[in-house]
């Protein structure tokens, strides 16, 4: 090829020519016929100009410098000035060439459309004088809208609004000290709170969505066992909770419950129901002041309905009342020292002191509600006895002496004679 040659540059095309005398590269734009001199070299082109489709953008590395009026700047040698190391975002415009030193980063990208109830979390990577923000500042671009990218702003993440249905709450945490979006209250970094309004909620840039909490629906037979994770005021009960406190939430308080960020659900408690024939023994009961009587036990007779109070109350046992026939008895043993009350427990019908290990009998007919200090060793039947009209039974025949037997026989004969005479008197009266 001769040193001097002619290049026809089509419309919307360009080429780069280097002058080897002063080592300056310039750009020639078509349509034209370019004659390359012997001291010039075409180092690029002809190349088509860059065309940005509608609603697209591109990024140019090392873009040319322009003055306040948008005029491209050149140095004293005629070389175009570049902003080395910088980048520039260009939007839809007329086809344009790339000046020597400029480069297209990637390819043409469509503009990002942010729909309603969504947002982009943006972060400034350099000071933004037009917005009055410093590098590192963050903010949200909320939809609906089209986001125009900038080289000095990074898209950190895309956010979507949380849609809350009835019986749900959104748990939020402050990323930094701020004023929350919903209640407009001052929040400290790390503080948590709930948003319970139905519908879509998009957290602000200073808020972090932790989880969506579903309400727990209660019934009359179940209760929620809650534990405080930190000190807070409980609006449901109107009391101040301390970290580590335990309490129950029952159906009488609310039908559905959403736990706050300051408490956790330990488990559920089932209602204990006692009819008039049952009783329950409870360890570590709670007194009228709400204090636990650790190490003590309590007997609850039916009918009754109650929940065990956390965390110390324990159900030892649930039993049915002992029903004794007239020829039955219970052998009892004292587990500790206590005063046997008058009536059911005392054989002599008087109050007495029972000592640990002591055994005695309780005879029928009747009901027996064993106290906490007593254990039932055995149910026994009479060895022998007499039915109506005597109703006399012997439970310990080995201990009955001869004199005792005579006394028993005398009593039996007297009761039989009395019954016989009573029957004669009734017959005589009928004859009259």
Image (tube, rainbow, N blue to C red):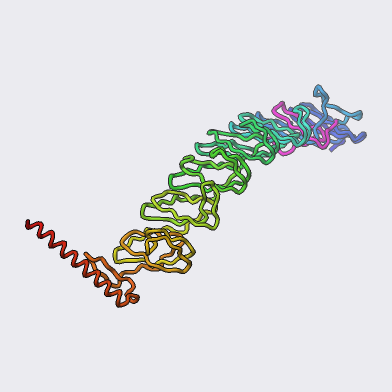
Quadrant where the image shows the N terminus: top right
| Location of residue 2 in the rendering, given as x and y in whole percent from the top left corner | 86, 36
Residue extending furthest toward the top: 69
When asked about the image quadrant of residue 125, the answer is top right
Picture layout, residue 320 above or below residue 268? below
Q: Is residue 148 magenta?
A: no
Front-lying residue, 77 or 146: 146
**Residue at the image position 61 percent from the left and 42 percent from the top:** 210
Left or right of 155 in this view: 7 = right
Front-lying residue, 156 or 132: 132
Query: Would residue 415 be seen by someone viewing this image from the given angle?
Result: yes
**Residue at the image position 61 percent from the left and 29 percent from the top:** 144
Front-lying residue, 165 or 61: 165
Magenta stretch? 81-109
Q: Is residue 87 magenta?
A: yes
**Residue at the image position 71 percent from the left and 26 percent from the top:** 93
When asked about the image quadrant of residue 393, the answer is bottom left
Query: Would residue 46 be seen by someone viewing this image from the given angle?
Result: no
When asked about the image quadrant of residue 411, the answer is bottom left
| Location of residue 376 in the rendering, given as x and y in whole percent from the top left corner | 41, 65
């Amino acid at each position: 090829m001769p040193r001097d040659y002619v290049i026809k540059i089509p419309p919307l095309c360009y080429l780069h020519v280097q002058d080897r005398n002063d080592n300056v590269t310039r750009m020639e734009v078509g349509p034209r016929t370019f004659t390359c001199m012997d001291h010039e070299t075409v180092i690029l082109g002809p190349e088509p100009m860059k065309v940005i489709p509608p609603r697209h953008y591109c990024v140019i590395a090392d873009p040319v410098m322009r003055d306040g009026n948008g005029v491209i700047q050149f140095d004293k040698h005629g070389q175009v000035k570049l902003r080395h190391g910088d980048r520039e975002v260009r939007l839809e415009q007329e086809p344009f060439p790339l000046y020597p030193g400029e480069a297209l980063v990637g390819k043409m990208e469509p503009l990002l459309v942010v729909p309603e109830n969504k947002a982009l979390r943006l972060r400034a990577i350099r000071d933004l004088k037009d917005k009055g923000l410093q590098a590192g500042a963050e903010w949200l671009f909320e939809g609906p809208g089209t986001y125009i990218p900038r080289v000095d702003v990074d898209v950190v993440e895309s956010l979507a609004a949380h849609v809350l249905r009835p019986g749900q709450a959104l748990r939020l945490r402050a990323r930094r000290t701020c004023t929350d979006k919903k209640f407009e209250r001052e929040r400290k970094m790390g503080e948590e709170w709930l948003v319970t309004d139905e519908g879509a909620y998009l957290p602000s840039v200073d808020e972090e969505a932790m989880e969506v909490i579903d309400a727990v629906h209660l019934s009359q037979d179940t209760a929620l066992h809650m534990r405080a994770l930190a000190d807070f005021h409980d609006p449901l009960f109107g009391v101040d909770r301390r970290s580590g406190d335990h309490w129950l939430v029952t159906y009488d308080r609310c039908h559905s419950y959403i736990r706050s960020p300051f408490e956790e659900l330990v488990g559920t408690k089932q209602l204990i129901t006692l009819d008039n024939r049952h009783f329950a023994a409870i360890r570590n009961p709670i007194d009228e002041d709400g204090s636990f009587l650790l190490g003590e036990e309590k007997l609850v007779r039916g009918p009754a309905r109650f929940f065990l109070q956390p965390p110390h109350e324990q159900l030892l046992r649930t039993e049915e009342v002992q029903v004794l026939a007239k020829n039955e008895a219970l052998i009892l043993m004292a587990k500790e020292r206590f005063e046997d009350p008058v009536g059911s427990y005392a054989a002599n019908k008087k109050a007495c002191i029972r000592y640990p290990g002591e055994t005695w009998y309780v005879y029928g007919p009747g009901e027996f509600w064993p106290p906490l200090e007593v254990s039932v060793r055995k149910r026994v039947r009479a060895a022998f006895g007499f039915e109506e009209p005597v109703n006399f039974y012997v439970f310990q025949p080995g201990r009955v002496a001869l004199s005792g037997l005579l006394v028993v026989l005398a009593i039996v004969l007297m009761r039989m004679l009395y019954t016989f005479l009573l029957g004669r008197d009734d017959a005589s009266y009928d004859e009259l």
